[in-house]
Image: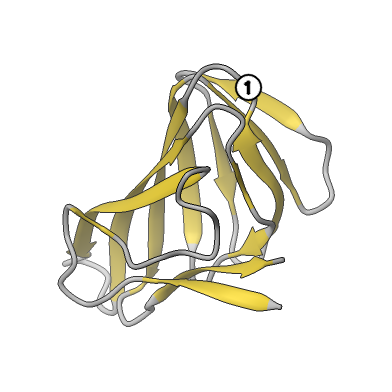
Amino acid sequence: MIKTFIVGAGVLLFPLPAAAHDPESAAVTLVYDQPLPNVPGMSIRGVLVDYAPGGTSPAHTHPNSAFIYATVLEGAIRSAVNGGPVRVYGAGESWSEFPGDHHSVSENASATEPARLLAVFVLDTDETELATYED
C-alpha cells in the first residue's frame, strides 16, 4: 500500500496532518514555505523530522520536481538512497536527494537518544505531496 504525506496550503509552523508513519516514531513539521521570487512556479520548504529513540520512517519517494538537502541537527540518522549503502550521518552532516530518488532507509541510528533532521525541499509550488510512503 502507498500512502502520502500531504501539506495543506498556508500551513506554516504547525504539525502536518497525520503522516503514513507512526507519530510516536517520527514527527514531521513544516517550518518554512516560501515561493522563490526569481524562479516562478518553484518554492522552498523546510521540514523538521524528529525521530524518537529507535524511530523510523517507511521507505518513500518525493515529488519528481523535488530536490532535497537534508542536514542532521541532533543525534544520528541512518539513511540509504537508490539502493546505495546504508550510511550513518551525525549532527552537522548532510546529504542530497534528487528528483525521483527512492529513500529506502530513514531512521534514528540510536535506540536510546532522539534524532532530528531538517529537510529543505526545492519543488513545484503547487506540489502538495512531499512524500509517498510504502508499507
SS at circle 1: loop
Examine the image and state in which quarter residue 16 appears.
bottom left
Residue 125 as seen in the image, left or right of residue 86: left
Name the residue nearer the viewer: 38 or 51.
Answer: 51
Examine the image and state in which quarter residue 12 appears.
bottom left
Residue 4 as seen in the image, left or right of residue 105: left
Q: How is this picture coloured?
A: secondary structure
Name the residue nearer the viewer: 9 or 20.
Answer: 20
Name the residue nearer the viewer: 54 or 107.
Answer: 54
x and y, in percent, of residue 78 in the image:
67, 32
Whether residue 64 is visible to the viewer of this picture, yes or no, is: no
x and y, in percent, of residue 71 in the image:
45, 33
Please determine whether, in this image, residue 79 is positioned above or below residue 16.
above
Quarter of the image for the C terminus: give it.
bottom right
Amino acid bearing label 1: Ala
Residue 100 as seen in the image, left or right of residue 116: right
Q: Residue at x 22, y 65 (%)?
A: 36
Residue 123 as seen in the image, left or right of residue 82: left
Please determine whether, in this image, residue 38 is positioned above or below residue 103.
below
Callout 1 environment at 10 Å: few (<14), some (14 to 19), or many (20+)? few
Q: Residue at x 73, y 29 (%)?
A: 87
Residue holding disc 1:
111
Quarter of the image for the N terminus: give it.
bottom right
Examine the image and state in which quarter residue 86 appears.
top right
Whether residue 59 is visible to the viewer of this picture, yes or no, is: yes
x and y, in percent, of residue 128 in the image:
37, 78
